[in-house]
Image: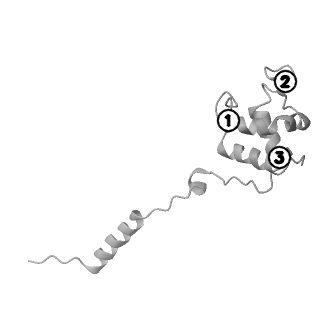
Amino acid sequence: MKFILPTAMLMALFVSFSQTSCYYDNEVDQYGVTACDTTAVSYANDIAPIIQQNCVACHQPGGSQESSAMDTYDNLVNFAVSAVDRTNGRGNLMPPSGRMTSCNIALLEAWVNAGMPNN
């Protein structure tokens, strides 16, 4: 005796397999990750918050690294290139707590490459 599945049952199986076999994983939708936009880096909006969060605790007058203060734009400009090198692991890794996010590093590099504008 032959067993033949009805057409509707075959279609239901096909649809259920096709819905679960391919999955498009979009990080932005699933995890809330946004792209790192380095096209128009701003000192005030992008760089200053990164420096404040990761550097100023030590790199300020009275801090353990006050000789390379980064608490103001003018002070940061003097050390920005070496700071980017250190965030990338060239020399002593900065910050000592661990490497910054790749987006923060990319923003710092883009800002330095753009001539460190005070915008």
Q: How is the image coloured?
A: one colour
Left or right: 93 in relation to 55? left
- Kindly report which numbered mark, 1 or 3, lies closer to the viewer in this rendering: 1
Earlier residue among tags 2 and 1:
2
State the residue position of label 2. Answer: 67
- Residue type, numbered disc 2: Ser
Which residue occupies the foreground of this view, 107 or 46? 107
Name the residue nearer the viewer: 71 or 77: 77
Tag count in the figure? 3
Q: Give the number of the mark in front: 2 or 1.
A: 1
Disc 1 + disc 3, Cβ < 8 Å: no
Residue in the picture at 65% in, 44% down: 102
- Report which residue position mark 3 lands on: 45
Tell me if label 3 and label 2 are in contact, CB under 8 Å.
no
In the picture, measured across the screen, residue 39 lies left or right of residue 101, that is right
Marks 2 and 1 close (CB-CB < 8 Å): no
Give the amino acid type for the residue marked by disc 3 in the picture. Answer: Asn
